[in-house]
Amino acid sequence: MEAEVRIKLKHGVADPEGENTKKALNLLGFRNVRAVETMKTFRIVVEEEAEAGEGGGEEEGREKSEEERVRQEVEEMCRRLLANPVIQDYEIAVVARNCEDFQNAVWNLTQKIPKGRVTTYGEISRKITGSESAARAVGQALAKNPKPGSGEGEIPCHRVVKKGGEVGEGVENKIVLLEGEGVKIKDKETKKGGKVENFKDVFFPAKCEKW
């Protein structure tokens, strides 16, 4: 099993490295940078425990139990070594048993996003792993999308956007597809590639909906 740990300072704790980086970026001409937050990421591969014997239950149940064991073990690693709980917060995401499983889970969820709606990389990560910390891995999986588009059987990766509704850079075709489905995009001329209007209204799944 594989776990990803993201560690960052608690809200209100001084971040001199982030502040110095922000000042340096401003001096280099990036004057629109208002804040820089530093964080550490650990990728931890944990060997699975050997099966106690045959017929120990359904495979799905064993996988769930194994994921919980890994999560608890990595939690202990954070408390004892990786993080300082007094000044730091951390998130743990236990990634699927192998890359192919994770990719398939991402693609299957993406196919459930209705036309005219959007979700985020973090939301898909949360559904699969219980945390948003595998959002980057979701993006990597969608970059390998074998059936992009919005037709029958296709995987509409254009309906997945960044946190807050930002579409992203260099995604003109993504904007065309979204607008063709009735999703309004504002600030398209910015470097961030625009942002979904009324993001909360078109976000999937809403509180009353399920994947």
Image (cartoon, helix red, strand yellow):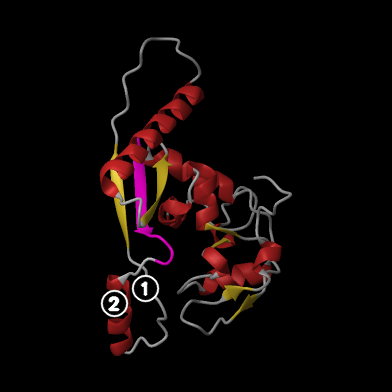
Q: Amino acid at mark 1?
A: Val
Identify the magenta region: 1-12
Please state the horizontal and vertical placement of residue 40, each as a whole percent of the image: 30, 57
Residue under label 1: 36
- How many marks the image carries: the answer is 2
Based on the displayed image, in which of its 4 quarters is residue 178 positioned?
A: bottom right
- Mark 2–mark 1 distance (CA, rounded to whole Å): 7 Å
Near-viewer residue (207 or 202): 207
Please state the horizontal and vertical placement of residue 5, each as a whole percent of the image: 35, 49
Contact between labelled residues 1 and 2, with CB atoms less than 8 Å apart: yes
Residue 25 visible in the displayed image: yes
Any magenta on residue 5? Answer: yes
Q: Amino acid at mark 2?
A: Thr
Tell me the tag on residue 14.
none
Question: In percent of the image, x 49 and y 49: which residue is there?
Answer: 125
First along the sequence among labels 2 and 1: 2
Which corner quadrant holds the N terminus? top left
Residue under label 2: 21
Please state the horizontal and vertical placement of residue 202, each as a whole percent of the image: 69, 63
Q: Is residue 129 above or below residue 117?
A: above
Q: Main secondary structure of the magenta part?
A: strand
Q: Residue furthest top?
A: 54
